[in-house]
Each structure stands twice: as structure tokens, then as C-alpha cells.
Image (tube, rainbow, N blue to C red):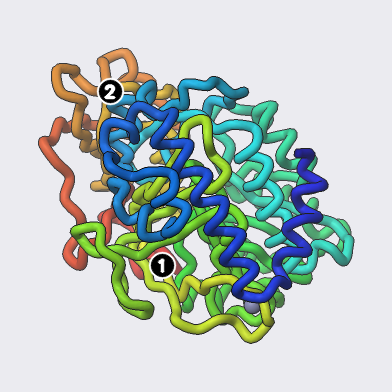
Amino acid sequence: MPIGERLEEFRKQQWDDLETFERRRSARLSELLIHAVANVPFYRERVSGLSSEAIRSDPLGSLARFPILEKQDVRDDPEGLMCETGRRLVRQHTSGSTGVPLSFYRDTESLGASLATTQLALEWAGAERGGRRMRLWPLSAGATRPSRLQRLVDRIHDRVVLNTYLMTDETIREYLRILNARPIAVLEGHPSAFVEIAFCAERHGLELPRPRALVSGGANLYDHMRERISKAYGGPVFNHYGSFEVGLVGSDCDRRRGMHVFGETTVLEVVDADGKPVEPGEVGELVATHLWQTSMPFIRYRMGDRGAVSAERCDCGRPHQLLERVVGRSGQSFTRKDGTLVIPDVFANIVAKDFETPDIRKFQVVQEAHDHVVVRFVPEPGTEGIPSDLRDKIAARVSEVMYAPCSVDFVVEESIEPAPGGKYFFAVSKVTVGTPDW
Ligand SMILES: [Zn+2]
């Protein structure tokens, strides 16, 4: 179905009553589970004794009998996760800011559904009222322009992207000139990009743009950051939560009482260590099922974040479940000698995405000093993880983004543990002072 029609459908369905909304979601979930058990080897091997009738009579109960899908499962056996009845697939590769690089496939149907929810979320932020849309987003290093798929996505969302991969004071000045040239309706961006630009404007006494609304995505938005970004740019901040693998999962509406979980495309569960659901309000692991992804189904996919859903619905009247908060993985910005910051995702991209580093399971980049960076990584068994020619390229690129020669050490680890408190940092700076997340 063309994206425009799908969007139109979602626009209507967002005002359905809870019962209708959930009945539709359950029907779609049943179809997906029946399909997965019948046509996807990974699920056929792991889920037994579930008849189509049993799934139809209790889709959510049946879902609970599916295993949690780990990134490692996708890495280990991508073929086994593909449906045997072939579809048109789009290859994706991500560092996902998770410290675990991943290649996988999505089909055009699921990409379309995700694009439609993203567009709906932008409309909640005011995009439907027209006006200029801009996006501050890091492209990969060396990429002078977005990929073809990305250009298509940007055209669908009718936005112009400014690459924040490498921001110097000079580029920020140039971006501010572009941003301030005409009024902006919606300014999307990574929270650290908003912060970095605000820092620079403050340092040089420059004007910040005053968009009607800001949309923050790609990393955790903490309450204090939301307040400060909102104050600096003079507009409300709408938080988005999702991942490259499953698309947009949730978004604030204009009430900002919690992120609406897009039941149109996704079933989000909060589970404990055994994969059992926890009570609303209780923090657990977030696992997501994409309802439209049939060619390589992501069912109960572990997002790598923790969070809690609310028992209540939003008073805007939409039927969605609310995601109260996300306690996610995180990265710290690195500080250059001149005091400017480099956002953490840059390092995730350098290590895991730019060169499609194939043989690492997990990594963490640590800034030990202005000119000293350590890349810790867990290699795939039986490999050296990052071969020496790649190490040279990675080191060269680190120096490039830090604007100074950096010594880069590579350390093989057996595992990389989360920080005290359970939070996993994929980029850690021992140099950045204060709260690097602003
Ligand atoms: Zn709402």
C-alpha cells in the first residue's frame, strides 16, 4: 500500500476507541505469529505446539510463548530469520548506538508502515500546519550526502537535513545562518546536536532558531535536557523513541504525558529477566514486535533499553498505551582540546558502521585524554574482531573528528559490563567535565 494511504489509515485509526484499536492490533499480531511459525525457520524450530486456532484465540498469550529475540540471534543466523516465501527486501546496517553492530533486512511494507507512523508523529508536533521542516542528523563519516533510501525518507517527510556528524564552530555558524534564514515549523534532531549548537551559540553570542516545535530522537532525552532545550530554542520538545531495527515505537503528543506507543505498527512489552511481563509503572526490559515486518520478523526483539509503561491512557483521547519513561543505553560526548564537543554517536559510527566492521560483538569507546582514545571490543569467536588495516582507518578517523592526532589503542575484551546502575555506555569520556548530557 502506498505510504500516503497508510498514513491516511493511521490518521483515522488514532481516534478509534480502545476496544476497536486493540482488536485490530490483535488480529494483525495473530497473522504475524501464524506466518512466523509456518514460514520462518527460526520460529518454527523454537515455538512448538501453537496452532493457528490457539494463536487466534489468544494472540498476546501466544506472543508470550515466543523467545525474546536478541541482536546476537540476528547476527548468528540471519538466514534462519528470513521467511521462505521471499519478499522485496532492503538491507540495513546500523551501529544503533548500542555498541552492537548489526545487519538485517526490512521489507517495503514494514518500512512504509514505519514511515507513516513517523509522519503521524511529526503531525502531532505541528507539521500538518505547514511550514519549513529541518533535521539535524549525523550522516556517516565520508558521506557528503545521504544515502538514496535516506533521501527518499527525507523527501517523504518533506525535510532538509543538516549533517551533524562533524560540527565545528564554523559549520555551526553556517547552520545557524541556514536555520535562522526563515521560520521553522518543526526542527528535528538528536538531543546532543541541539545541545552542541546551543553551547556554541552561547559561546559566541549567536541567535538560536525559534522553531514552533522541536522533535528529539536517537538518544535518551532526560527531563533536565528537555527543559533546557525547550528554554534555549523557545519551543516545546516532543520526544520520540524507536530504533533503526523496528522504526519509531513511541512519540509524545501535544499533552506530553508519556510517549504514545504506536499500536498501529508495534506491540511493546516490558519484561523481567525471565521474559515475564512486569506491572505498569515498573521498570523492565523493553521488547518490541513489529507487526508489519513479515519477511524477517522481529518478534519480541530486545531493544537494549529499560523502561516503564503507564496503566493510564492519555487525556488527548487516543487509544495508545503510554511509555512513561525510557532508561536507556547512553553515550557521553567527547571533548576536543579547544573545548568543543563531539557527540557520542560519531564514535559508534566510526567503530561499527562506517566500515561495516564485521566481526565485533560489542564495543565501547573511551576517551582517556584529549589525545588518547581506547576502543574496547569483544570479537566474534575465532576472529581478531577488528583487523589491523581497519584499526588504522578507525584511528585515522578518530584523529580527524578530534581535530588533533590521537593515539588510539585497541583492547580485546571478553565482555563489556554495564556501568554501576546497569546503564550501558557505548562511549565514555574521562575528560568531559560536568554533565556531558547537559
Ligand atoms: Zn496524548
Q: Amino acid at mark 1?
A: Val
On the rendered structure, is 365 left or right of 82?
Answer: left
Residue 326 disc label:
1
Residue at 27%, 39% in the rendered image: 48
Viewer-proximal residue among 43 and 130: 43
Viewer-proximal residue among 155 and 167: 155
Q: Is disc 1 placed on a helix, strand or loop?
A: strand
Q: How crowded is the residue under tag 2: few (<14 C-alpha within 10 Å), some, or many (20+)? A: many
- Disc 2 or 1, which lies upstream in sequence? 1
Quadrant location of the C terminus in the rendered image? bottom left
Instruction: Where is residue 88? Give x, y as percent.
Output: 62, 23
Q: How crowded is the residue under tag 1: few (<14 C-alpha within 10 Å), some, or many (20+)? A: many
Instruction: Where is residue 407? Give x, y as percent.
Output: 27, 32
Q: Residue furthest top?
A: 389
Query: Does 260 appear above or below 374?
Result: below
Instruction: Where is residue 293? Give x, y as percent.
Output: 54, 39
